[in-house]
Amino acid sequence: MSSLPCNHWVIGDVHGCYQPLQRLLSALPKNDHVVFCGDVINRGPDTSSTMHLVWSLVTAGRATWLRGNHEQALLQSVSEASLTSPNPWLKRLDQLPDVFQGDGWLATHAGFDANGSPNLTIRETFWEHYDGSRGLVVIGHTPRTDVERHGQIVMIDTGAVYGGKLSAYCPETEAVVQVEGVQVDTAAPRNRTAPSVQVEPC
């Protein structure tokens, strides 16, 4: 029911969109827990500030940062570089979980493989064969023009870094809050149709 308080907000791929993330966070209830669905980093105009903001929320207990394929790639490159020069982000990235478990739902970056293990790059194989056994699954990874629900899968990456929206989804109420992403000329080019605005406060 929409009158119930939202307990969690799952945020789609931020990809270094620092200013949109600030706007989105300011629109969400301050006492609710935020779950970043991976790919907080890369592609956008300000990955460094975005990483520090998200990590500050994690250390304050207000957020969970899930591992995406971009975090995994950075972790691997940082690990290699740390052989000669230790990097404080190595330990932080290494402890990022793959899954956040809610009550009847969970969030992960892209989905699960046939063995039920989190897979950070999976797409159609998961979408087409998920049987609902884990409950509702909220994922990012693949940009859509708007938040989409396909059976027991909710896709929340709405292409903020490509001129779309940055979206937050509340699994408890199905409410969606969105803000404008970055202008397309400030990020890597990609042909997309910008999604319509949808703001449904909890």
Image (cartoon, helix red, strand yellow):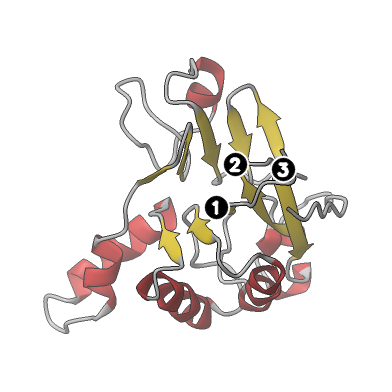
Q: Quadrant of residue 164?
A: bottom right
Residue 179 image position (x, y, % from top left): 76, 64
Q: Quadrant of residue 64?
A: bottom left
Residue 112 image position (x, y, % from top left): 40, 30
Residue 199 image position (x, y, % from top left): 82, 55
- Residues at marks 3 and 1 touching, judged by CB atoms closer than 8 Å: no
- Report the side of 14 relative to 2 (left or right): left
Of residues 137 and 145, the one nearer the viewer is 137
Examine the rendering and report whether any part of residue 104 can be seen: yes
Q: Residues within 10 Å of mark 2 (few under 14, many from 20)?
A: many
**Mark 1: which amino acid?**
His
Of residues 189 and 88, the one nearer the viewer is 88
**Mark 3: which amino acid?**
Val
**Mark 2: which amino acid?**
Pro
Residue 147 image position (x, y, % from top left): 72, 43
Label whose residue precedes the other's in the sequence (3 or 1): 1
Instruction: Give the residue at mark 2.
Output: 171
Instruction: Give the residue at mark 1.
Output: 8
The residue lying furthest to the left in this view is 83
The residue drawn where x is 52% and y is 60% is: 34
Label whose residue precedes the other's in the sequence (2 or 1): 1
- Gap between marks 2 and 1, in whole Å? 7 Å
Instruction: Give the residue at mark 3.
Output: 147
Q: Residues within 10 Å of mark 1 (few under 14, many from 20)?
A: many
Question: Which image quarter holds the N terminus?
Answer: top right
SS assignment at label 3:
loop
- Gap between marks 3 and 1, in whole Å? 16 Å
The residue drawn where x is 62% and y is 39% is: 155
- Report the side of 124 relative to 60 (left or right): right
- Report the side of 68 relative to 82 (left or right): right
